[in-house]
Amino acid sequence: MSRSQEPEGLYRMLAMVFAAMVVLMFFFELAKQTLNPDITLWESHGVTIVFTSALSVVLVFFPLRSAYHERQKTKEELRLRQEAEENLRRSEMQYRSFVESVEDSIYTVDRETRYLLINTRHLVRSGLSPQAYAGKKYADFHSPAETRLFEKGIETVLATKRPFQDEYEKDGGYFLRKFYPVIDPERNEVVAVTIISSDITDRKNAEKHIETVNRKLNLLNDITRHDILNQLTVLHSLLDLADEQSTDMSAKKYLARGEQVIDTIHAQIAFSYDYQTIGVKSPQWQDLTQTVQRARMPLKIGDVILDASCSNLEIYADPLLEKVFFNLFENSLRYAGAHPRIRLAAEKKDGYLLLTYEDNGPGVPDEEKEKVFLRGFGKNTGLGLFLIRDILAITGITISENGTAGKGARFEIAVPAGAYRYR
């Protein structure tokens, strides 16, 4: 600390010491002059007083300054420690308030699964007192099977230093359990694990109820669809017989129209099945080249060019991805003729993958580019492109039409990061 930084209190103290020494030395010299009147001015009085006082101040200054600084340092350390203790107390109080206010069971265990902290909710759920948990491990209150499952979660957190969760069933209820690591920042080591256990019995029961309802609805849809298709087959046969036996050209025209209606109904029923199965199965990684090849086979489309950028490309999508390309091919057949030329290419762009599907058909007018994806729009059933958009949306994939009218259709499929990869 420089002289300009010395505290004023220290200098006031030194001034008081100097003044006291001057007074003390004055009375000492006065007594000496009284006892020896012949003493000279040089030997006594002011010179001796000032010199002795100044020397005393010098001798006192450094020890006094050191002592003063130590006292100030001690006071500052005490203040900082008190502030730290107060902040820790406040933080602990807030943490305890949070832990006690939630409806979930919260407890912390060390690396050997010994209980360190338990909130009231968990005590109520277990029916035990805090003293009952003192020094005890998880295995002291649970079966061997439960303990193995719990220790597996602890071991996973210790090994990965990342949260882990599992579900378990107990006493007819269902629980979601989340394991959070408590990491020592100095050693970067997991020293304990905090567990939050939530009762999800109501949610599980609701999921089971919804699953049962969906299963019944799907069964009803399957039965109804099967019966309608059988009746359509019979109706189609009857119309064929009527057409063969009829000689009235007007009647034949109406019979042909009836058969077209049957084909439309058949297509709508097939759509209802496809739409019903969207999202039923989990998305999966699918090889683009193989998916396109399977989609083109039923339609026997020969002129399909797969750009080299599509090689070894996999897309994370609903299992109905094949249906997407089938409907695109069918759309090209309908508008570009019996032998359409189709090209499919891929390009990385701004963090996502852009799949481009082009054909040599008439294209889509600007005012219809968004309408083509609406249900019922179009010359046929108007369901194909509507189905495509919903299938792709399962994994965040979007589709749009960005071609130039009169120069062929151009569908752009944007695959987000994480939903595509190259093998």
Image (cartoon, rainbow, N blue to C red):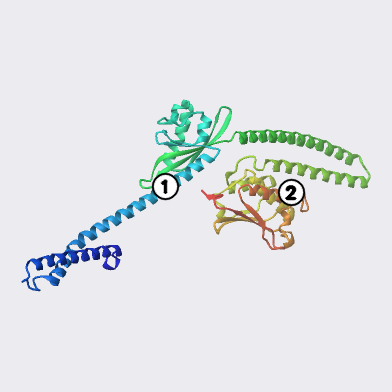
Nearer the observer: mark 1 or 2; the answer is 1
**Of residues 122 and 300, which is closer to you in this image?**
122
Question: Residue 385 at x, y = what percent?
Answer: 70, 51
* Residue 264 placement: quadrant: top right
Question: Residue 114 at x, y = what percent?
Answer: 41, 33
Q: Amino acid at mark 1?
A: Leu
Residue 405 lies left or right of residue 31; in this view the side is right
Q: Residue at x 55, y 38 (%)?
A: 103
Residue 392 lies left or right of residue 249; in this view the side is left
Q: Residue at x 55, y 30 (%)?
A: 169
* Above or below for 287 versus 123: below
* Residue 35 placement: quadrant: bottom left
Q: Residue at x 44, y 27 (%)?
A: 140
Q: How would you rate the neighbour count of disc 1 (Cα within 10 Å): few for under 14, some for 14-19, many for 20 or more?
A: few
* Residue 131 placement: quadrant: top left
Helix, strand or loop status at disc 1: helix
Question: Residue 91 at x, y = what percent?
Answer: 45, 47
Residue 220 lies left or right of residue 251; in this view the side is left
Count of labels in the image:
2
The furthest residue to the bottom:
41
Residue at mark 2:
383
First reached walking from the N terminus: tag 1 or tag 2: 1
Task: Please give the label number shown on residue 250.
Answer: none
Residue at mark 1:
88
- Does the rendering let one see residue 223? yes
